[in-house]
């Protein structure tokens, strides 16, 4: 019998769910990105990628580019490189600076040794075969060139996971409800070096710790709601759980002045 976590993991890498629901447009991704407005310290993530690409010229493939946050900055700050945004969702590419391609990271439409850098930012946890996808990215890279991956730690935003378990428990009338789907755990900051190390010799990790302090339940409810595509994997009424979570957050803010969330994301800069 398939375990509950295995079912959730399969759903996180389900291409139909990803392309037609989770990332059919940029709405849910934007809700998750927007919560970082309240993080201290602030990190300019596109700036970090621009810095890491300082020695790179030629072709940069942003695989799983989503709503084009990184593509847009590269066009602006590095007009000398040719950036190609790629995603399995045609819808999310609508507003991304051209050229863009609807493409699957697991079968890149590029020749061997044709790219100077590949970006795989917060996306490798969504592919069903992570090892094969890393090999596919290495295939299109010229010798000595860069893969920049990013993801979150297993400890990232645990307060939101705990909030969900408590709210789901309240909705179901039990002490602890089922855990919500975890997006990054299949390729977390802790697991990523082993995966990448099977292909890349030189891996440098840039960790980005921070704390989000929020005084309004609305962005937190929007963050939880951004998992709607996986509502069927929750084992609890989805919208009711979000309403209960918003009440818990409001009560925490009333007593403690804010709701705090510890974050840990990071980049892995890898060379062949
Ligand atoms: C969490 S978003 C990250 C977007 C962007 N890279 C960023 O960091 O802001 C993950 C993106 O990867 C895309 N994606 C998931 N699986 C993919 C695959 N197999 N091939 C290409 N894109 C994929 C999704 O459609 C989504 O836009």
Image (spheres, rainbow, N blue to C red):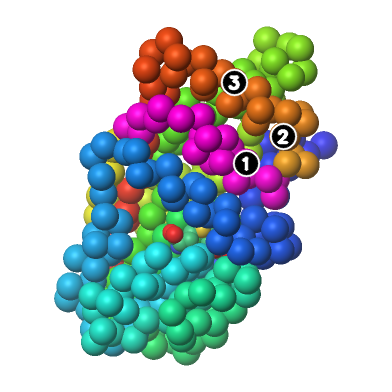
Q: Which residue is label 2 attached to?
A: 239
Please identify the quarter of the rendering in which residue 203 is found.
bottom left
Q: Nearer the viewer, mark 1 or mark 3?
A: 3
Q: Which mark is residue 225?
A: 1
Callout 1 touching callout 2 (CB < 8 Å)? yes
* Residue at the spot 69% in from the left edge and 17% down from the top edge: 169
Q: Is mark 1 within 8 Å of ligand 1?
A: no
Q: Is residue 27 left or right of residue 271?
A: right
Callout 2 touching callout 3 (CB < 8 Å)? no
Please identify the quarter of the rendering in which residue 80 is found.
bottom left
* Residue at the spot 57% in from the left edge and 68% down from the top edge: 92
Q: How dense is the environment of label 1, judged by Cα within 10 Å: few (below 14), some, or many (20 and up)? A: many
Prevailing SS of the magenta stretch: helix
Give the mark nearest the N terminus, 1 or 2.
1
Q: Which mark is residue 247?
A: 3
Does residue 141 lie above or below 228 as drawn?
below
* Residue at the spot 60% in from the left edge and 46% down from the top edge: 226
Numbered disc 2: secondary structure? helix
From mark 2 to mark 3, how far is it between C-alphas?
A: 13 Å
Numbered disc 3: secondary structure? helix
| Residue 30 shown in magenta | no
Say which of 28 and 202 sits in front. 28
* Residue at the spot 59% in from the left edge and 79% down from the top edge: 102
Numbered disc 1: secondary structure? helix
Magenta range = 211-230
Q: Position of residue 129 (x, y in %)?
A: 60, 60
**Quadrant into which the N terminus falls:** top right
């Amino acid at each position: 019998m398939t375990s509950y976590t295995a079912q959730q993991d399969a759903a996180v890498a389900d291409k139909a769910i990803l392309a037609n629901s989770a990332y059919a447009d940029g709405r849910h991704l934007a809700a998750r990105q927007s919560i970082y407005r309240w993080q201290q310290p602030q990190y300019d993530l596109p700036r970090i990628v621009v810095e890491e690409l300082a020695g790179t010229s030629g072709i940069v493939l942003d695989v799983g580019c989503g709503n084009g946050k990184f593509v847009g900055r590269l066009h602006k700050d590095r007009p000398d490189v040719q950036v190609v945004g790629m995603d399995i969702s045609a819808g999310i590419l609508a507003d991304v600076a051209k050229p863009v391609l609807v493409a699957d990271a697991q079968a890149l439409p590029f020749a061997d040794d044709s790219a100077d850098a590949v970006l795989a930012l917060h996306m490798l946890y969504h592919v069903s075969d992570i090892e094969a996808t890393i090999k596919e990215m290495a295939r299109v890279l010229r010798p000595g060139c860069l893969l920049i991956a990013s993801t979150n730690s297993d400890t990232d935003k645990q307060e939101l996971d705990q909030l969900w378990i408590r709210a789901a428990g309240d909705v179901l009338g039990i002490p602890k409800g089922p855990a919500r789907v975890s997006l990054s755990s299949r390729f977390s900051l802790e697991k990523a070096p082993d995966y990448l190390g099977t292909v890349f010799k030189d891996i440098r990790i840039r960790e980005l710790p921070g704390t989000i302090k929020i005084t309004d339940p609305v962005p937190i409810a929007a963050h939880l709601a951004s998992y709607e595509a996986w509502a069927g994997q929750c084992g609890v009424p989805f919208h009711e759980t979000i309403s209960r979570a918003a009440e818990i957050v409001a009560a925490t803010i009333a007593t403690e002045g804010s709701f705090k969330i510890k974050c840990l994301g990071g980049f892995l800069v890898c060379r062949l």
